[in-house]
Image (cartoon, coloured by chain):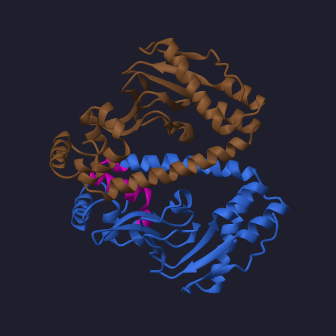
Chain colours: A brown, B blue
Amino acid sequence: MYKIQLNTNLYGTVCSMNLKDVELLKNQYLNEMFSVMNFSEEEWQVITDLHVFRQYKKGAILLKKGQLSKVSYYVVKGCLRSYYLVDGEEKVNAFYTEKDYFTPSCLVTNKPAEHYLDCLEDCLVNVSTAEDEAIIMKKFPRFEKLCRAYSEELVVKQKAEFDDFKIASPEQRYINFATNRPDLLQRVPQYQIASYLGLTPQSLSRIRKRLSKNDFSANKVAV
Amino acid sequence: MYKIQLNTNLYGTVCSMNLKDVELLKNQYLNEMFSVMNFSEEEWQVITDLHVFRQYKKGAILLKKGQLSKVSYYVVKGCLRSYYLVDGEEKVNAFYTEKDYFTPSCLVTNKPAEHYLDCLEDCLVNVSTAEDEAIIMKKFPRFEKLCRAYSEELVVKQKAEFDDFKIASPEQRYINFATNRPDLLQRVPQYQIASYLGLTPQSLSRIRKRLSKNDFSANKVAV
């Protein structure tokens, strides 16, 4: 393992994370990433040169409908939310938290985004462009294998989530969410969770009340 | 382009496609695939040696809940359907037709399937195991790039479909389906389309009636 020399490509809006915290988080992220990959000295240099971190304040908008994003996001710290605006109503379609990777569809389709992306918390994200990724892949073809495996896993994970959403009752959908993403119950306003689950806030409230009365709580899943 | 020499790994149940049709379809498939990829002689040999085709009759079950699939499927001809059984009711989650590729989640997660996979029509499919794919990737690393790009596109396509399903009204969901997959309107029973769209057959019937009265038909999309 080589000594981590962080590059100085840190930009973005000012947020409440102090510089020490940010440096610590970046170190953690790079260490985690590099410990898995066993980089050579050359690989290390190219990767660190290309790594760009950005800080955003809670409420910052990263992408709007109609825009063409140039970057993918890896969440080092914080929570991003993706949503559509339908007849003035926000319809939440995704939350991205620590260790989640998100490629806006524009990067693949070259069509403007249909959705919005904003920060529900102060965020530290690692951003990469298609050009950065092409440089890495060309220089170090073994990353193709890693990225292919990751994408294939993501295809299966997404499919399972979609299937769950389709076949589960509203109550079961909430139980699945609370079981798989208990952290989000504490981090995200309830009306946004309702939107994500395709429910009205009133329906979600009724479901939570019903569950808190029966043995769902006995299964040690926070409602 | 090298001359196509089909291997003899053709097995599966007997179906109504005659041998001439099958050979024609296999030739078409291999030609299409190879014309894009510009194979070398060595690549050609390895790929054709590994290509296994199977024929299935309409109604054949390829995978059941609880089983571990060993293969991925590429549909050369026909229509596969994936569904869950929930309290005795079939909940359709996918249709796969010509040029669709489907990797059962078991191949990535190593957990038994939660769903079923059957044939809605007589089918000719190309099957591949994880071992076949590993052999190809190891011998010809450039396929990593192709497969990575394909998987990344699939992630974006799946996400868009999931988002559409979440944010669209039942009527809009049906319009999207009829617009994007008009072939399936003719090939799949209406109650299965209803299930796929998360609707009751009665709701779908009402939506179709309503649409046939207004200008949806004027947009030349068959309802």
Q: Is residue B219 visible?
A: no
Give, as a single range, the part of the protein colored magenta: B165-184
Relative to A124, residue B100 above or below: below
Residue A37 in which image quadrant: top right
The residue drawn where x is 33% and y is 50% is A176
Determine whether B91 is above or below A163 in the image: below
Left or right: A127 in relation to B23: left
- Residue at left offset 61%, top offset 77%: B54
Q: Is residue A68 left or right of residue B90?
A: right
The picture places residue B206, in percent across and down from the top left corner, at 21, 63
Q: Say if A133 sits above or below B155 in the image.
A: above
Kindly tell me whether residue A189 is visible in this rendering.
Answer: yes
**Residue at 71% in and 53% down:** B143
Q: Is residue B169 magenta?
A: yes
Q: Position of residue A119 (x, y in %)?
A: 39, 26
Q: Is residue B75 above or below residue A65?
A: below
- x%, y% of residue A33? 61, 34
Magenta stretch, overall SS: helix
Q: Viewer-proximal residue, B126 or A121? A: A121
Image quarter for residue A80? top left
Q: Quadrant of the N terminus of chain B?
A: bottom right
**What is the quadrant of residue B208 in the picture?**
bottom left
Q: Is residue B26 magenta?
A: no
